[in-house]
Each structure stands twice: as C-alpha cells, then as structure tokens.
Amino acid sequence: MSEIWFTSDHHWGHANIIRFSNRPFGSVEAMDEALVERWNGVVRKGDTVYHLGDIFLYKDLSRARAIRDRLNGNICLIQGNHESTALRMKERFAWIKEIAEVKVPDNDAPGGKQRIVLCHYAFRVWNKSHHGAWHLYGHSHGSLPDDPHARSFDAGVDCHDYAPISYGRVKQIMGTKQYVPVDHHTGR
C-alpha cells in the first residue's frame, strides 16, 4: 500500500544552506547525498510526496534531473521562492502548484478525509482552519516558533531529521496541539 509523505526545503545544490541552517554536512556533495539517502530510506516507489518548495538550487539542469531520477515516489511540488530549476523540468513532477488543498483518507477525520492546506509559506489562518483543516509549510527552516495552538507546523527537512515525514507522523504531531481558533468564526 502506498503512503503519503510531506517535506520541504531540501535546497539540493545549495552550498550556503549548510551554513545558513547549520546543517551537519561538510560539503554540498555530502549534503546532497545524505538527503537522497534519507528520502529513499522512507519513501517507496509508489508513494506520494508533497514537497513544499525549494527543492533544487542547481543552475545545472542535468544535476537536478540526476537527483530527481534517484528519488522514490511521485512528487507533487508546491512552489517555493527558489523553483527556477524545477520549473525547467516540470515533466519530473506529478504537478506543480503555488498552493494546494489535499484531502487524505482518514477514518478519524471529519467525513473520513483530512483536509490539509499546503504552501511554502506559513499562514495564521487558512481555509477550513476552524473546521479541523491542517496547514503544512516550509520556508522558515525551523526558525519560526511552532504555535502549539494552531493545527500547522513546518514540514521542512531541517525540522525532521532531513527526511520526509509520513502522514501518520503529521497526524501524531497535530494530535499534540491544543487548537485555539483565531478568526471570526469563534463567536468572540
């Protein structure tokens, strides 16, 4: 049975991200290889991966294609602010969008489907947030403090041991949050 995964901000080919995000890699080559290994260590061929942006920073398209060809799973890409390389190889992705709302089958969710709003950037509120929808984002590389009262969090590799996280893990994290509504639907 195929699984669903979420991730963001790999920055393959970006040497400076090692310093910017204090990543534990000695070189961009070592980082790139470790990120491929950690991806393929959890994602299988038929799985679906929602990547929330900033996947490649290679200028050389052939290097980005070589990495993509090694990655397991069908990748649905949410555009980040560094997507010029990915946009030149659209055929390597199931789809590319700026924002997406997905519904994951889950018997514990309202109506048997968990709605998740996906964007590269963090939101304070999102569609159906007051009806149990979740929000996953990237971009901040773990620097944005988590809000324990919002059904959202950073799905980026810098926050999750440099690997994609499963829907089951997302559900587990969301289960620890004590939701407090922040929009006009609260009746306050």
Image (tube, rainbow, N blue to C red):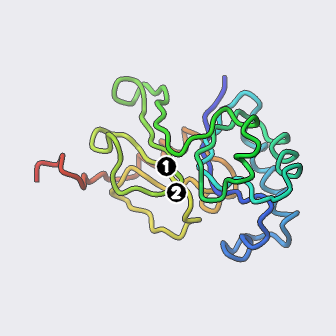
Q: How many marks?
A: 2
Quadrant housing residue 71? top right
| Structural crowding at the residue carrying mark 1, measured as other residues with C-alpha within 10 Å and reported as few (<14), some (14–19) or many (≥20) | many
Q: Is residue 158 above or below residue 77?
A: below
Q: Residue at x 76, y 42 (%)?
A: 89
Q: Position of residue 115 (x, y in %)?
A: 42, 35
Q: Position of residue 131 (x, y in %)?
A: 28, 38
Residue 144 falls left or right of residue 66: left
Q: Amino acid at mark 1?
A: Leu
Q: Quadrant of the N terminus?
A: top right
Q: Are marks 1 and 2 in contact (CB under 8 Å)?
A: yes
Name the foreground residue: 62 vs 69. 62
| Structural crowding at the residue carrying mark 2, measured as other residues with C-alpha within 10 Å and reported as few (<14), some (14–19) or many (≥20) | many
Disc 1: which residue: 136
Q: Is residue 43 above or below residue 55?
A: above
Q: Residue at x 37, y 59 (%)?
A: 148
Q: Position of residue 87 (x, y in %)?
A: 70, 46
Q: Quadrant of the C terminus?
A: bottom left
Q: Is residue 120 above or below residue 15?
A: above
Q: Residue at x 85, y 70 (%)?
A: 27
Q: Amino acid at mark 2?
A: Asp
Quadrant housing residue 51? top right
Disc 2: which residue: 154
Cα distance between the residues tagged 1 and 2 = 6 Å
Name the foreground residue: 171 vs 122. 122
Q: Earlier in the sequence, mark 1 or mark 2?
A: 1
Residue 41 falls left or right of residue 100: right
Q: Residue at x 73, y 34 (%)?
A: 73
